[in-house]
Structures are given as structure tokens and as C-alpha cells.
Amino acid sequence: MRHASLPVIAVAALLSLGATAPLHAEIEAGGAVKADTCADDGKTLGVSRTIEIDTTGGPAIGGDQKRALQLLNDGEVVLTFDDGPMKSRTRAILKALADQCTKATFFMVGQMALSDPAMVREVAAGGNTIGTHTWSHRNMRFANTKAIDQQIESAVSMVAKANGAPIAPLFRFPYLSSSRQAEAYLKNRNIAAVWVDVDSKDYLTRNPEVVKNRILAQLATSKKGIILMHDIHAWTAQMLPGLLAALHEKGFKVVHLVAKAPVATIASYDAAAEKAIASKTAAKAADPMAERSLVWSMTPAPDAKHKARAVKKVQGKPAIVDGVPATAPSSQSKTRAPAAAKDETPFWQFNLFN
């Protein structure tokens, strides 16, 4: 990891986020950032300041990682969401954020971006930051050099192409599980790894109130932090308005992370992403029901050997993703679910549609 003394962080204004962004910010004396009139009435959470991150050298941000850059003051939080986008849940989350005039960072899975490119653009249109979360939510601790390359680059190119615009060089490890090899790869690519201070563990329950209270309990102790949530869970979307209201009531301030420069993509992966999006578009035009297939196969690179796997339905839902069921079979089903790969935690796959 780079030493914190290196000039990798600058607090800057968002002078303009374009017509698609409803919230702007400007630097005041001393470096504080003032949100626009959307939050000036004090009735909404807003964005207290924006931190622009120079990702040169692939710094670690937050968490308890050695030499990680700690950017937050007491009373400050960063809102982050992993694993999406998923239209029904992500759109509800975007509404909750907009209602409070605030912003978040979304770490998107490449396959999910391919499933709904329009939703990627909708997230960006709200002025939120978009990073990546691997191509298929693979546990990078067990990935070899080739897999690291394909998982990271396929996601970066796909999410950028789905967005139709550059994205941030910000990355989050699935399961918060990394390796020296994977971290070295990010450093070489000038992609920052964003870690977690407050884990909602919203995959452990379907009760929105439990998720909200778990987050608030951790903040009562930590006083600040990067909050991890998932925009694939209905209960997370349901609890978010209450969480944001509670943060506002308790005096917490939202900090928005942006990157100094966009992530650089690799041409061969860009070409593969464009081809996959074109194939998906053509399939949807030929068969409107094709839109129900959540995940689409994609060759990581033109010269990479990749065998596409069929996506088939189980009990009326798009269910098989790389040999792992996206939803757990019912207790009455006599069909056994395929075993998950040893380096994959099946929780993300099984809870994707819940």
C-alpha cells in the first residue's frame, strides 16, 4: 500500500456535474463543501463535502487495512452499495437518496451491468459515483493471475460501456476478501480499493429494521465510517429512507467520494463488452422474454478461451449463473442445487432475487 504521506488525496469542488446531476457543490473557505439549495433548508441529509481521490498507485481507502487512507472526520459517513444494479431495488434506493438530496458510491458487478445497461446510466444520472466489484462476484483471494485480470478488466470495460461514459477507478473486493496479488494488480492499474468501516450485513436478514439498527449501532461506536449495503436486496431498499432520516436526525454528514480521473480501460476488453451488449440488445429485440435473463455470458477478452454457459430457468426464475443457482430451490424441490465452487461463497448468488 502507498504511504498516506503521498499526495493522493485532494478535497475539491464539484463545480458542475452536468445536466444529469441534481446536486452541485462548491468549495468554501477552509475547504468545506457547501451543497446546493437542495439541502440548504436543513430538512434533508444532503452532501456535506466531496472528496476527490487521486487513485495513482492504487491506494487503499478506509477500513482497517494497513496504511489505508482514513478520510473521514467524526460524524461523517460514506454511503456505498455493492452487487447491483438490479432495477426494482436500485431504483428504490436512488429515490431514497434523491429524496434526501444525497449521493452514494455503487460498486457494480460486470454481469449485472450487462443485464441492465440503462440502470447503470440511471445511477450515474443521479450524480452518484460508479466503481466496480469484479465481473462475477468472484472471491479474489483464490484467483490466479489470469482470473484477476479477467475479473477486474471485464467489469471495468462492461460497466463503462453500459454507462456510455467513463467510470471511477474505485474497486471493492467481493466478500471483502483480497490477496497480495490482486492488490498489486490494482496498484499497477491505479485503481483504489475502497474498504468498509460499517458493515450492514444485510444478507443475514430480511428485516429492514434489523439492518437499519445494525448500522446505527456500529456508528454509535465508530462515530464515522464507510457504510456497506447491497442494492440487490428488497429489505435494504425498504430500510434506506428510515436510515437516511435517522442519520440526519443524529447529525451525521454524508461525504461523497469522486475520482480525480476516470479509470483507463483496455481496448480488447472494451471490444468484448461492446459485442456482448450488442448481442444482448439483438436477443431482446428478437425475444422480449430474453430481458428476464439476468446474467449474460461474456468473453473476458477476444483472445481468451471462454466457454459460454447456458442460462436456464428453475421454477420460473432466471436461476443458473455459472453453474450456481441464483435462487435457492424450495424445500419441496427434489432437484439438488449444483455445488458452489470452492472459491465462491454462495450467499450472494442465492440471495440475488430475494
Image (spheres, rainbow, N blue to C red):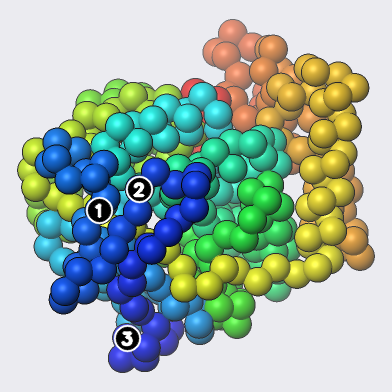
Q: Which residue is mark 3?
A: 4
Tag 2–tag 3 contact (CB < 8 Å): no
Regarding mark 3 in the picture, which secondary structure is present there? loop
In-image side of 273 versus 216 (left or right): right
In-image side of 113 versus 22 (left or right): right
Query: Callout 3 environment at 10 Å: few (<14), some (14 to 19), or many (20+)?
Result: some
> Looking at the rendered structure, which numbered label has been put on residue 183?
none
Name the kind of residue labelled 1 in the image. Ala
Residue at left offset 47%, top offset 73%:
260
Query: Callout 1 environment at 10 Å: few (<14), some (14 to 19), or many (20+)?
Result: many
The front one of 343 and 183 is 183
The front one of 62 and 27 is 27
> Looking at the rendered structure, which numbered label has been put on residue 35?
1
Residue 154 place in picture, x, y as percent: 72, 58
Residue 172 place in picture, x, y as percent: 48, 59
Name the kind of residue labelled 2 in the image. Leu
The front one of 343 and 263 is 263
In 3D space, how far apart are the residues under numbered discs 3 and 1 (Cα atoms)?
Answer: 28 Å
Name the kind of residue labelled 3 in the image. Ala
Residue 9 place in picture, x, y as percent: 35, 79
Residue at left offset 51%, top offset 24%:
88
The image quadrant of residue 140 is: bottom right
> Looking at the rendered structure, which numbered label has been put on residue 23?
2
